[in-house]
Image (cartoon, coloured by chain):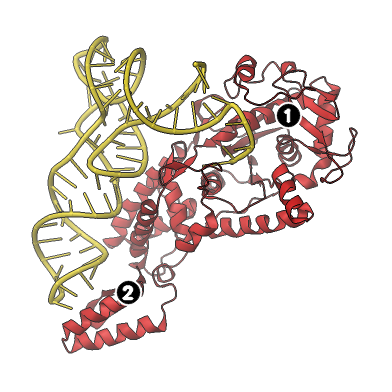
Amino acid sequence: MTQLTLYNTRTRTKEVFTPLDPTNVRAYLCGPTVYDRAHIGNARNVMIFDVLIRLLRRLYPRVTYVRNITDIDDKINARAKERGLPIEQVTEGPIRWYHEDMAALYALPPDIEPRATEHLGEIIEIIQRLIANGHAYVADGHVLFSVPSDPDYGKFSGRTPDELIAGARVDVAPYKRDAGDFVLWKPSTPDLPGWDSPWGRGRPGWHIECSAMSWKHLGADFDIHGGGDDLIFPHHENEIAQSCCAFPGSHFARTWVHNRMLLVNGEKMSKSLGNFLFLHDVLDKAPGEAVRLMLMRAHYRSTLDFSDAGLAEARKELDRFYRALERHPGVAAAQQTPDCVLEPLLDDLNTPGALAGMHGLADAALAGDANAAAALRAAGQVMGLLNVTPEEWFAGEIPAEVNALAAQRVAARKRKDFAESDRLREAISALGYAVEDGPGGTYKLRKS
RNA sequence: GGUCCGGUGGCAGAGUGGUGAUGCAGCGGACUGCAAAUCCGCGAAUGUGGGUUCGAUUCCCGCCCGGACCUCCA
């Protein structure tokens, strides 16, 4: 019996995953706030969830994968104001880029990609429910969630309300009854985007849109909710509070999967440090699969240092996998995911372990085992790797100039003019390609 | 200050109460005009001090070091 175990942030333990409805597993991932390019941290988050979805689809007949787009946000408003544009025009580019960048990493598209701007009705309905059952109040044009009204508040992130107040470093707005209360709805001035509501023209707070979109598309109870671990508090704590209080008796997401943050060349990536690494820039320098593999080289719950050296190693690992496939041209993927890859993945998404399994298969394939090559392809499918042919991986576009030099080199080797041969190899190398000699004067070119 | 996580070979990075995966790099050999790739082989690690145990890298405690969250951030 193949059983998936996942570390559940809610219980802080590894648990056997049991779907609420085995005929339809429902998962929600906090998607991007679209005011800028996606960065490499966004990519890690999507990659780990992508492998999870691929794995679930091998275990269950149907998986509904929802990943939202947050297109209402004060940063978006700020950009719109700067440029004198409506928010739709500010978010349009980032949404398109996000799709392009994630596609370059071979990320599966979500089944449903809801947007906050399309869910004002659900947002307002949840707020009304919260007011009606005493978990929210109107003050000074705002609607606030009343933290003291929810006895479970803080349990998820492991905090007590006292701690929250003690640790609060922000000024507490005077209209708040309790320092920990957070905004569900806030008024918009005429120069800001706003929507009509029972509380006047305004806009939703940060956390409410995820409660609304997951409810609409997955129901009040669903299986898995994912995100970066920096969202545990306050975002996910607040989502849980809103949703559970709005829908008494419901439990919101059963299993919470959070990935650790990543470092860039040893430093935390943050706005204040100004070292945000955009996916777009990384993809200019390295193939999408290399970036993807790089992000899988560490377990999702440990810190990953995204470095140039690591990216170079990821590329070499893929070279090895593709060489193994190259030895068995046209071999189709095996039906079953090989155990040496499946088992580590079932154990809380141990992607480094799965990669080790793939190296074992590559060894066997290189030694001539066609079944191992077929298994390697199947492993690639669940990992989202090995999406192209070996020829495409190695060759890419070989410039005519490089081909010409290589042809000259064959001639030089034929007449045993090795000095000229070596000179030509260096010339090819200077253009960014490596030449490998095969038997009988044959050769292969690849990007170096 | 509060809460939480981690310290494994040169680097990256898993697992495990009983002689420590995997990759990259390095070294020796085969192959090659020389290389590259491939194959064969090699060296190399569990922060520190205690405790539990027949036995701990794995469990517990102290210490040292590093990191995260508590504030917008995946």
**Left or right: A280 in relation to A378:** right
Q: Which residue is mark 1?
A: A243
- In this view, the mark in front (2 or 1): 2
Looking at this view, is B40 or A114 the one in front? Answer: A114
Structural crowding at the residue carrying mark 2, measured as other residues with C-alpha within 10 Å and reported as few (<14), some (14–19) or many (≥20): few
Note whether residue A334 is visible: no
Q: In the figure, A348 relative to A419: above or below?
A: above
Mark 1 residue crowding within 10 angstroms, few (<14) / some (14–19) / many (20+): many
Please indicate, yes or no, whether residue A90 appears anywhere in the rendered image. Answer: yes
Element assignment for label 1: helix
Q: Chain of mark 1?
A: A
| Residue type pointed to by label 2 | Ala
Do labels 2 and 1 touch, CB within 8 Å?
Answer: no
User: Residue at (84%, 43%) from the top-left corner?
Assistant: A194
Query: According to the rendering, which colour does chain A have?
Result: red
Above-or-below relation of A301 to A340 = above
Task: State the image coordinates of residue A140 (x, y, percent, origin top left).
Answer: 85, 27
Task: Point out residue A242 in the picture as x, y percentages from the top left corner.
Answer: 73, 28
Name the secondary structure under disc 2.
helix
Q: Are marks 2 and 1 on the same chain?
A: yes
* Mark 2, residue position: A430
* CA distance for labels 2 and 1: 60 Å
Of the 4 image quadrants, the one containing the C terminus of chain A is bottom left
The disc at residue A228 is: none
Report x, y in % for residue A50.
55, 48
Q: Amino acid at mark 1?
A: Ser
